[in-house]
């Protein structure tokens, strides 16, 4: 069986080739839609009907999208916040929703400390 996985996380898409062997070994067909920042409900409806899994960014996984996703088993958020996913509906229809806790903790902390120093020293 081949699994179809939609990868719509725009900052992950440029690195997909690094995982080509994993995808091939696990019979995963990668589906890469054009994404600027996030996919809207209407955009997702054009892609989701035969998708088994998703690696997404801040895409709008509404109840309408989830109920149209007949094969969908898991949504994995590339990041921490899952507020753009209707988790209640996903749970009701048996779709697992996962995220990557602490994925950006260090870079965010580094940035905050950098801004503190910039503003304290009036660098900008």
Image: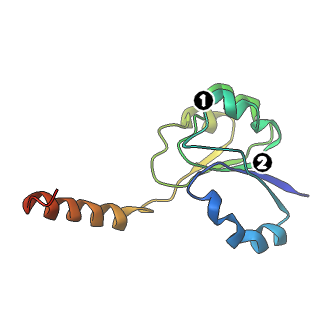
- Left or right: 107, with 58 as reference point: left
Q: Residue at x 58, y 43 (%)?
A: 36
SS for callout 1: loop
- Residue 65 x %, y %: 68, 30
**Residue located beneath label 2 in the image:** 52
Q: Give above or below for 82 relative to 67.
A: below
User: Local crowd at mark 2 within 10 Å, few (<14), some, or many (≥20)?
Assistant: many
* Disc ID at residue 62: 1
| Lower position in the chain sequence, tag 1 or tag 2 | 2
Quarter that holds the C terminus: bottom left
- Residue 71 x %, y %: 80, 42
Q: Residue at x 75, y 35 (%)?
A: 69
Q: Residue at x 36, y 65 (%)?
A: 107
Q: Quadrant of residue 49?
A: top right
Spatial separation of the CA atoms under disc 1 and disc 2: 17 Å
Q: Residue furthest right?
A: 1
Q: Quadrant of residue 72?
A: top right
SS for callout 2: loop
Q: Give above or below for 49 relative to 73.
A: above
- Residue 22 x %, y %: 75, 72
Q: Residue furthest left?
A: 121
- Left or right: 52, with 124 as reference point: right
- Left or right: 18, with 83 as reference point: right
Q: Residue at x 54, y 43 (%)?
A: 37
* Disc ID at residue 93: none
User: Local crowd at mark 1 within 10 Å, few (<14), some, or many (≥20)?
Assistant: some
For this rendering, which residue is in front, 55 or 69? Answer: 55
Quarter that holds the N terminus: bottom right
């Amino acid at each position: 069986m081949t699994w179809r996985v939609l990868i719509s996380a725009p900052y992950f898409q440029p690195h997909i080739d690094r995982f080509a062997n994993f995808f091939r070994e696990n019979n995963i067909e990668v589906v890469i839609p054009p994404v600027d920042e996030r996919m809207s409900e209407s955009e997702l409806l054009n892609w989701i009907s035969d998708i088994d899994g998703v690696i997404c960014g801040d895409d709008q996984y509404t109840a309408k999208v989830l109920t149209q996703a007949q094969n969908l088993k898991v949504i994995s958020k590339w990041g921490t916040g899952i507020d753009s996913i209707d988790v209640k509906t996903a749970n009701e229809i048996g779709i697992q929703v996962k995220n990557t806790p602490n994925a950006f903790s260090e870079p965010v902390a580094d940035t905050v400390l950098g801004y503190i120093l910039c503003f304290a020293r009036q660098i900008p």
